[in-house]
Structure formats: structure tokens, C-alpha cells
Amino acid sequence: MKKITLLLALIFSTTIYSQDSCSSPQAITSGLYTVTAIDGTEGVTLMCTGGQNATNAEWFTYTPSNNYAVTVTTDLTINAGGDTRFHVYTGTCGALVCHSGDDDGGSGFLSLASFNVLAGTTYYIVFDNRWESDGFDFQLTEAPYVEPLVSFVSTPIASTGTYRNCVVDMNGDFLDDVVAISETNININFQQASGGFTVQNFTTTNADFLPSWSIAAGDIDDNGYNDLMYGAGSGVTFMKANNDGTGYLETSGPEYVFSQRTNFVDINNDGHLDAFVCHDVGPNQFYLNDGNGNLSHNQGGLGDSPSGGNYASLWTDYDNDGDVDLFISKCNGGGASASARYNQLHQNDGFGNFTDVSVAAGLYDPIQTWSSAWGDFDNDGWMDIFVGASTFVDGAHKLMHNNQDGTFTDITSGSGIDTFTDTGIEHITHDFNNDGYLDIFSAGNKILINNQDLTFTEIDVYFSVGAVGDLNNDGFLDVFNSNGNWYRNEGNSNNWIKINTQGDVNNPSGSNLNGIGARVEVQSALGTQIREVRSGDGFRHMSSLTTHFGLGSDTAITQIKVTWPSGLVDVLVNPAINTTITLAEGATLSVDEFTNKDIIVYPNPSKEEIFVKNHNLTDTKVIIHNMNGQRVFNFKKEKNSINIKNLQTGIYILTLQQGNKLYQHKIIKE
Amino acid sequence: MKNIPTLKLIILYFLTVLLSCSNDESSEYYTPSVSPVNYNLEAFPYNTLSDYNLFEGDLQNQKPVLGVIPYKPISTLFTDYAKKKRFLWMPNNTSANFVSDYEILDLPVGTILVKTFYYNNVLPSNTTRLIETRLLIKKPSGWIFSEYVWNEDQTEAFLDTTGSTVNIEWLEEGVSKSTNYRIPSESECRTCHKIGNVPFPIGVKPQNLNSDYPYPQEGAINQLQKLIIEGYLNPVDYSNVNTVVDWKDLSKPLQLRARSYLDINCAHCHSDDSHCSYRPIRLSFHDTETSEANLGICVVPDEDVNSTLTHVISPGRSERSVLSYRMNSTEESTKMPLIGRNLVDDQAISLINDWIDELTQTCE
């Protein structure tokens, strides 16, 4: 009776076992067991619960004969006051994989975890001495197996760096890579087309500022290699990839900013990515791109609370008018006087001029918010919002439905959001179970699975929000978080499609190379789903720039429609499913067909009105860019003419798009 | 002198003039009766520190002129081991009122609070280096932050409210240390120095000043008494002020030392109407007197900083306590205090951990 006594042994009078190591575990079945002390010589180095390694452990194996939902617990009266921790692994010794585990899920510091097991698989259940080496009892119970709504398997990946908060394609092959940052290093696990990763380290200059608060990625110089922005407590650093992706050049702004969320986004709609940074203690700041990847600092006009309180910026077209608007999740101490804690919605007029419409929209909430999740939760073609509370002192989480008229209605009550009580700083939305409806990954290690009717079901996934992408290219979204673990989505039978957007940087009126700001729409039997290409959502992380759609059991897509920041619209009819499509801006459009029709634009130059001969404008999209590539909106389309009296004098590029036909012509406004 | 009625002042003035005129020899004993501080409230803030005439002789010696009174809170804020000299000054014939033990003195318009941050034994030559001098000036509209950054020559400090970073290496008790010392911008000053988004001083509370200070002339006397003598504080009985302890004083009870440390290092944000008021803890000496919840004992954190942390303070388990974890961190997004330090205050960590580990409460 070295250390463990099967309580059953009292009845059956058996058993002497050793459970000192992975190679000499004690096989158990359902029942109650006693560990007399944790002194097994093989400790644990693979953490399934977070935290640090432990020097000693007790090793058990459990091989069920049927599929079960199993509960392992030390939360027993006899253990009151104790402090336990355990891990559940699959795999083989030396190549274990986390399956479950718990530290403090029971009362006090006791542990409790429920997880699914499959018949014939061997599970290692390992109690370690991280907190105490004292003996304790534990119980394993079996309940009927329930198909999980979503499940992940934790997989270590050789990602080394202080800041492990970024999953995005870094080398232009449209496969998500894993990025980790240190003071003088960018560590990238490049995903291989054949599966797995190839690690490469890029030495950098000693970064003035580190991504301690957030990171964003985007290709500011359109060279095919994404650049990075590190958001730190007293400034930002840009690391610009060179033209062959072999190195990064640091630019650190001298400007002080207490960074929170950072983004790359084309703020002034000129086809070039700009950079935005939320300021905790002052008005927000942004850097405008001159078109050659040179960034100039600006402050003012994009959330100017003198005391800041800007925690997360989220760029979304909430009013479906074709430009990106700005929502700022805000948080600010100071009691009743802390006006800077009210969330803000800034409406874009198309020129990069933003108007605060928070009150009119119904989003002027005092909730202490570090981030919010914007997505179309009911597939009606309009972005809704989950407002994520970091504490309930000034209001709880809210689910706001887009009324399609610039306002939102609170539909929290009865949605399952009202009973969700975990608080936190990260709130993001993705379709994790590929059922065609957006879920919400939020606080307390919970994913709120969309029940497809604007209600949600809480699922505990036992890990916190991280950077999201598809790390094995299987069409199911995985998570990489600061534990350095890849939480691989185990998937299901649902169908999917992924779409990469590639802006036309050779066209002066084209979009940025990443297509950031594009609206992607997928139509299938279950309805129409929308996504936006965003650099920087949630609070801290950078997630994939590839748009991902679950299709449920739909086996076909009617069409994919991409509305680019430039205004052009590409439509791809009847594409294949369960694959990734890379769509280049204008790829589905044809200039030739349109020009055959002898369109004449006159008079040119013009002061007030230009007429379009031989073409009816009713079903035609009219897009006008100035010669800087900036899209302008202050004109009015009539039946067969365009009123340009409000345009500033100058030369413009007029684009007419009807279906997949395109016409471009220079016009001069006098 | 300020409480002396005007008539007496006038007589004294004439006497002084008479004496100084009648006897040249005695002029070395002459002391000006009015503080020579260059007081022009509308012109504040000046472009240089010397413009104020707060100090006599070499500016870098920080020898205060008449009316500029040195002081020191009983427990002090940790800022990467920087040493500090603090002074206060009030305009002629103005004085402060006592409000309560734990609130700052009601200081008159024109008050200047001065705090110089410096290091001794700066490498490579073991020199003293003054980094910055912060002035909090009370204008009719409220307090303003005036930040002065010292030049290389240590001859002058210039107004600069944009913030900057200085790398500094020095010997701390014989051990070499270095930090990227942060000189705050105005918005960083405001982050800590505010109540309800209105700028405010932090240290000048009776609870922090009710202790002896070694003044050059009087010797060691109570700081509140000194302010009363100077006419800077209207007479008040301070004998019952609920006073913090010096957290480094090992003879004092652990909890009292911990509460005193948390007050001066954390309470400016963790109080009602302050920067982090939306978090549940309240760490001022006053707020922690009777409430364990205010200290964070058994309080479940709002934010999941690390999965092993169960409570803000987990009694008996410093390793499981967010407070200890954050104090022990140098990572920008987890460290506490949020600004003002890059290094860990090891001595304070020991105190806080010892205190937490002795707590015996059982959390629900």
C-alpha cells in the first residue's frame, strides 16, 4: 500500500500500485480513490490549466469502454481546505496532449472538471504538487456522452517570445502563421501547405516599444509582407517587413501614447492603410500613410475625450453605406464624473470625417468596456454588437441588434447574455462550430454558441481568448493564446469556406493590398452571412485577415460578394465549398464589355452636371476618386446624369460598375 | 511670521531696517522677512525652475529660500528607487485648513508643491543626478502640473510637459541597477493626480505628515506643527490624527505596514472617483481600516490576469493573489502600479507576501 488505496480495496481487499510516473501509471475506472501524498518522481511540464510546472505528480490512466461525459473532482468534504490541481492528457508518454484539467474549479482551491471521453482511448489523469503535496481523495464519475457544441485540443507549438498574441499570414501565402514578439526578435512559425510549421527568427533592432498592450498587422507598403504595430504603454513601434520578407525595419514614433487597441485601417479611404491607436489617457492618435508606407502622426477627430478612456477601437460599416465607421469601447474611472467611460460610435462621412453618433444610435453606454464584438448575429446583413463588460459596476454585458436605420435595440433580455456573469477584457466573434452563425468568445474561458435565434449557450473551453486563425487549414478556427498553446478546433461535419481578399494596388483608385475594410458576403441556403476584413479586434490580439464562414449543412454557395473599400464590387457565382478562395479586386470585372457600348461622358470639364450617353445609370454603381486615390462621396447620381456641383475643382476618376462590367474615365470638375 | 498681525510686522520691519542700517556688522544676521519666491500666479508656469526663485545658491543643491518648507510623507511612493526632495510654499498671508486625517489639506490659491526626483551614485562616476522637478501649482481655476526636466549640466530644469524617457544606471546599496526612467507627460501626471477627473495633490494629508522632520534650524519637530509655526496651517489639534506608519519600520505590525504601503503606492487610483474606481478594491489607509473587502481579501478579480490567481488577496496564499502578482510584475499590462515604475520593489513584495501569508480568512 505504497501511497494509494482504492477505497474499494476495503471491500475487495486488494491492491498495491505504483503511480509515480507516466510510464507506471495506475489504471482506474469510475469510483473514489485516495492519494496519500503527491510524491511521484515524474512531475508535469505540460500545463493544461495554465500556471507553472510541478516537481512531483501522481499518474493515473483511464480507458473507458464507452463514450462518456466524465467528471473528475477533488471537491469532496474530506478534502476541505486542500489545494489540488490536475491535468488530463491523451497521447503517449513523451508526446502527451492536453485534453482537460483544472486547478480551482471546485470550492476553495479544490479541482473539478467535466470532459468527454471516447471508448478505447486512454486518458492520463495527473495530479501535481504545484500547490501542496498532501494526500487527498478524488472521484471519477461517468455520465452519458453528449456531443459537444465545439471542442478544442491543446497542442504545444514551438512559439518563443515574450508576447504571443498574433496569428496572421506574414509571407503572403495566405496560410495563417503564428507570431511571437520579443525586444529584438520576431519569431514566426510559418504554416506549411503540407501541414505543420517552419520556425524562423528575425532579429530586429531593440524595439523602443513592445506589444505589451496590443498588436496589429497589415501591409502598409503593399509589398506582400505584413508589417506589425506594437502598442505599448508610452508609445508605438512599427516593424516594417522588407521587400523579400527577410527582415524588419523599426520606426518608433516619438509621440507619447498610452496604447490600448491598435489597428491598421484605411481611415481616409485613399487606398493606403493607416494606423490607429487607442489612447488610455488622452485623445486617440493615428498615423496617415502617404502612399509609400511613410506614416505621419495625427491626433484629433477620432475620439477626443481629454482624459482618454479609449480601450478598443473596432472599425465596422454599421450603416452599410460603404465606408468604415469607428466604435470605441471605453472605460474610465472617476465615478459619476467619468464621462470618458461612455462608449462611442463615430460615423464616417466617407472622407475620413467622423461624427459622434453614440447617443442617437443607442450605444452611449457607461458600461466599463475594454472590447466589444461586432458581427451580424442573425444574418440579416447588418452588424450587431455584443458590448463586453469588464466589470458590472457600471452595467453588464449587452446585446444590441442593428435596426438598419442607424439605431440599435437592446435584446439582451432572454438572450443568454443576461445570465452570462463572467467579466473580462476580451470579447470577439467568430463562427467556431461552422454552423453559419457567429459565436462570441468572451470572458471566463467561455464561448457563447449562437443558437441561431439571437440566443446563446455558454460553453466552457478551459482556455482564454487568444489570436484566432486556421492553423491547420482545415476550415475550423483555432486559437493561439499567451500560454503558447495552439488550441486546435476538433471540427465537425459542417461545411465552410474561407476567402482571402487582395486589393488592387496597381490601380490608383484600388484598395489596400490586404483588403482591410472590405465587406464579404456569402449567400447559401441558410441565408446571407457578412464579414469584414479587420486588422485588430478584441482588446489585445491580432487575428487572421482571412475571412471565414461556416456553412452548416449547406453544400453549395449561391454567390460570394466582396464590396471593396474602393467601392468596386466583385461577385463570384457558385464557388466551390470547403476550400479557400483568394479573390483579387476586380477579378470578376470586365472593362472590355462595357466600353463596347460607346459610352460618352459630357460635358467634360463640367461645373454642375455630367451626363452619361448611351447608358442608363439606374442599375449602375457610380464611384468617384480624386487623383490621390481617395474615394469621394459628395456627388449625386441621377437617372442619366451625375451632379458634381459639390466636388472641389480638380481631376477625378469616374468609375461606373454595372454587374461585372466596368467603365473608367477621367473627369474634370471646374 | 504669517500669523503676526500687520502692526507687529511693520514694527519688526522698521526694527530690522534700523538695526541693519545702524550696524553694518550685523547685516550678516539679517534675514529677509518676506519669502523671495517670485510669485506671479498669472505667469505660472515659468519656463525654467530657477524663474521661481524657490532655491538659493546653486539650483542643484535645492537649498530652499525662506518660506519654502521641506517635508516628507511617512511612507513614500516607490519610483524605481529614485530619491526625492519635497517642498511646499504658500503666498504671503495665506494658509491651509485641516479637512480630515485622510484628505489633503485645503491649500490656498498660489500654493506650490515641489518634488525633485534624483539618484545618487549614478554610474559611471558615482555622481548625483537630478532628473526632474515636478511642481503642482494651485491656480484660481485649480491645480496645474508643471514639469521641469534637468539639463545635463545640472544647472537648470526646463518646462516640458510632453514626457520623455531617461536611461539611468546607478548603485543602489552597492548593487548596480538600471532603468528607463519615465518623466511623465501631463496626461500621465493626471492619471494618478486626480479625483473625479479634477487634478489633485496626493501626499499632503495629515495622516502622512504627522511625524517629526529634521529641520535645519528647529531640529526635529512635527511637520504639522512646523506648518502651523510657519503660518501655513491654521492651528489645529493633530494629536488624534489616524496616522500611517513607515512601512519600512519593522517594529510596526505587518497589517499596518502593508496598509501604509498600499495607501501611498496604490490608493491614488484605487479610491472612489479615481482612475481605477471601477475595480472593487479601495486601498486608502482610511478605506482599509475596517474593510477586508476594500483590501481585496477574498475578492474575485474582474480580469483573468493569470489562471492560478484566485482572489485579489487569497489569505495565506500570496502566490494565488493578484495583488502580489501584479506588484511583482514588470510587464506593462500586468504590473501595478500601472505607471511610475519599471522595477520591482523587492522589499515591499516581501512585506506584502509576509502579510498575505499570515492571513487566515477562509474565502467563500
Image (cartoon, helix red, strand yellow):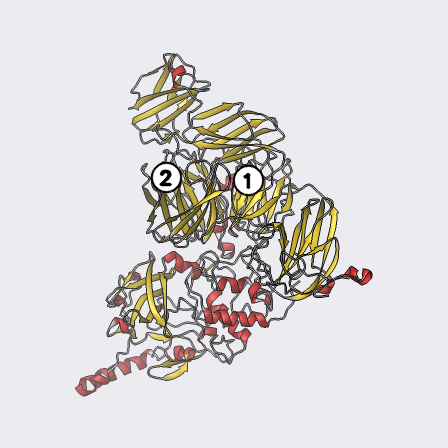
Using residue A225 as the reference point, say whether residue A61 is left or right of it.
right
Label 2: few (<14), some (14–19) or many (≥20) C-alpha neighbours in 10 Å: many
Q: Residue at x 42, y 41 (%)?
A: A170
- Which of B353 and B83 lies nearest the eye of the viewer? B353
Q: Which amino acid type is shown beneath numbered disc 1?
A: Leu
Residue A650: quadrant of the picture: top left
Rendered-image quadrant of the N terminus of chain A? bottom right
Q: Chain of mark 1?
A: A
Q: Is residue B244 left or right of residue A420?
A: left
Q: Is residue B317 above or below residue B74?
A: above
Q: Quadrant of residue B152?
A: bottom left
Tell me where residue B234 appears, x and y as whole percent.
Answer: 42, 76
Mark carried by residue A355: none
- Do badges 1 and 2 share one subunit? yes
Q: How many numbered tags mark residues here? A: 2
Which residue is identified by label 1? A477
Residue A669 lies in quadrant: top left
Q: Please give the name of the residue rendered at 51% of the width and 51% of the height, measured from the top-left corner.
A: A484
Q: Secondary structure at mark 1?
A: loop
